[in-house]
Amino acid sequence: MPEGDVVWAAARRLHEALAGRPLTLSDFRVPRAATADLTGRTVREVASRGKHLLTRVEGDLTVHTHLRMDGSWRIRPASAPVPRDHRVRLVLANAEWQAVGYSLGIVELVRTSREDQVVGHLGPDLLGPDWDPAEALRRLREAPEAAIGEALLDQTRLAGMGNLYKAETLFLRGVDPWRPVGTVPDLEGLVELARRLLDANKERVDQSTTGTGRAGQNTWVYGRRTCRRCGGRVRRAEQGGQAQERITFWCPACQPGGG
């Protein structure tokens, strides 16, 4: 699933293409919004909130989308033919640009004044202008017995963290993914490191937590068989409650704890 930095970058591209211009086309290809027509309305802005995208249109309307596992947005010249691809869920266009949403997990139209109905449950956004580390720490500490690897992916505690940054942050801090939140040393430093990693990657094409973008060297443990630091075998296992399991990666030598 795309992480907060990827969604932030998508919001910026959409904002640059759509904001301040009236829509000449709005083509919703999902049943619940199939009759919606935003043609003639000006896009005010496009913003990200964690892993959610909010395209705010005049008239107190917001197009709420979520990439989920396979979604993406592509920006094309307005003169390009409107795609007939079955994966397309939404097309928004103006006189200059055409934004095409493929395989979007969520497409819905809500009142801008009621956006809290769809994103109000989220914790502080790691890349948000109103990032609040104290609130993020408070929410994480509400469940001190929870495994830190699960807590970091809980979007109601802090928004934008995904599996890659969870694994890499815990590795860099030497914390076992199964360690209870209440026993993690310097939780504040861990959260700040996660924020810095996302911030450093939000404008990169290829994500990297090691300082290099070379294939096979851009992560320490995530997606790897051997630890990039010590050379030991990287372990992987499912972590999370039923229907929420995610594969986590860790190095037992660099992250002792017996997870």
Image: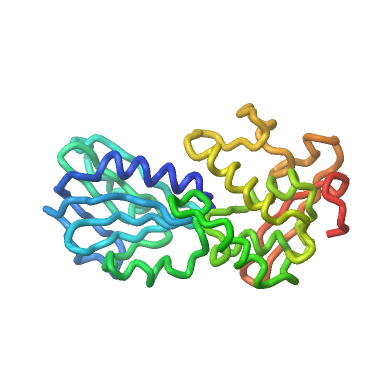
Tally of marks: 0
Location of the C terminus (image quadrant): bottom right
Q: Is residue 259 left or right of residue 35?
A: right
Residue occupying the point 42% across, 47% down? 72
Whole-percent x, y for residue 37 in the image: 17, 60
Identify whether 242 is placed above or below 26.
Answer: below
Whole-percent x, y for residue 39 in the image: 14, 54
Residue occupying the point 88% across, 58% down? 258
Whole-percent x, y for residue 62 in the image: 28, 61
Which of 132/236 is in front?
132
Which of 122/137 is in front?
137
Residue 243, located in which quarter of the rendered image? bottom right
Residue 16, located in which quarter of the rendered image? top left
Whole-percent x, y for residue 234 in the image: 80, 45
Q: Is residue 216 left or right of residue 31?
A: right
Residue occupying the point 86% across, 49% down? 252
Identify whether 175 is placed above or below 140.
Answer: above
- Residue furthest to the front in view is 134
- Residue furthest to the left in view is 40
Q: Is residue 145 left or right of residue 56?
A: right
Coloring scheme of the render?
A: rainbow
Residue occupying the point 50% across, 54% down? 131
